[in-house]
Image: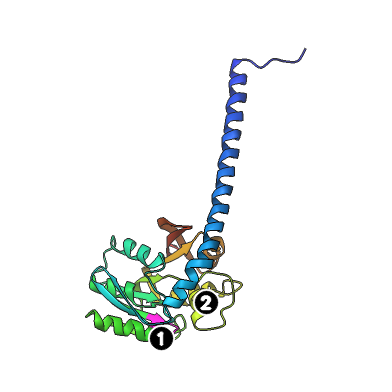
Amino acid sequence: MPDVPNGYERSKIITDQFKNSGFRIFEAWNFVFKMMRKIIKGAVNRTWKPFVERYLRKSRVYNFRNISLTISPGVFHPGFFFSTKIVIAFLQKQKLDGKTFLEMGSGSGLISIFAAKQNALVTACDISPVAVKCTAENAQKNGVKISVFQSDLFSDIPPQQFDLIIVNPPYFKKHPVSIEENAWYCGENLEYFQQFFHQVKSFMNSSSNIYMVLSDECDIAGIQKIASLNQLVFNLVYEKRAAWETQFIFNFQFIKS
């Protein structure tokens, strides 16, 4: 005659079944959510994206709080994407007064101008000459002082060390074939991040902080591995779900010996 489970064993069996059932339900809903997000994003790309591309063929004025920008064609427009506003929401909680501040890939200059208005000592750079001109003109328009450089990553930034380095990087795995595509594509093997983390160390001191915006659509594990190989430790400091994606801000610092 087979052994009959006692009360405790029967209870444990039932509990385990509920746990397994709950996990399967969670996995099913998670799969459905991801599929719906993919469908919505595809629909947006087919409808909204062409409209945005047509709209941005001309210079446009964009106002954010007390900052007024002129966005040139070919420059990342902060009004149509979430990442810039997420960075500013995070920076509002940081003490920027008197800090040396670098924005890597400044685009329109909105983040740099915001930081300068908080009395940070701001340097901005971009690989695009159009974006560099746009940042400089918007800084002047808003009455703030920013040192602006055209630079492929750190190649043409004068040697110095920054307290804060802000980067909203390209993270889609494709080789960019134009200046404009550098805003989106990081190379098939994350070459952008390999170069960034290798070069950035010369512009940091022992207490410097890098704040990098990433999305759940990019290879976060691969990016973090490259950072670790360059003696940088990372921590998640901010998270925000926006429409069809979740965006994160990671803090990178030197590994303490």
Do the residues bearing badges 1 and 2 touch, measured as CB atoms within 8 Å? no
The region drawn magenta spans 125-131
Q: Amino acid at mark 1?
A: Val
Marking on residue 233:
none
Residue 41: x, y in percent? Answer: 52, 61
Residue 74 image position (x, y, % from top left): 44, 81
Select label 1 or label 2 by which is in front: 1
Q: Residue at x 62, y 19 (%)?
A: 10
**Cα–Cα span, label 1 and label 2:** 23 Å
Vertical arrangement, residue 94 with respect to residue 116, above or below: above
Tell me, yes or no, whether the highlighted magenta stretch contains residue 222: no
Q: Residues within 10 Å of mark 1 (few under 14, many from 20)?
A: some
Query: 69 or 148: which is nearer to us?
Result: 69
Q: How many marks?
A: 2
Q: Which residue was labeled with disc 1?
A: 130
Locate the C terminus and report the quarter of the image it occupies. Answer: bottom left
* Mark toward the start of the polypeptide (1 vs 2): 1
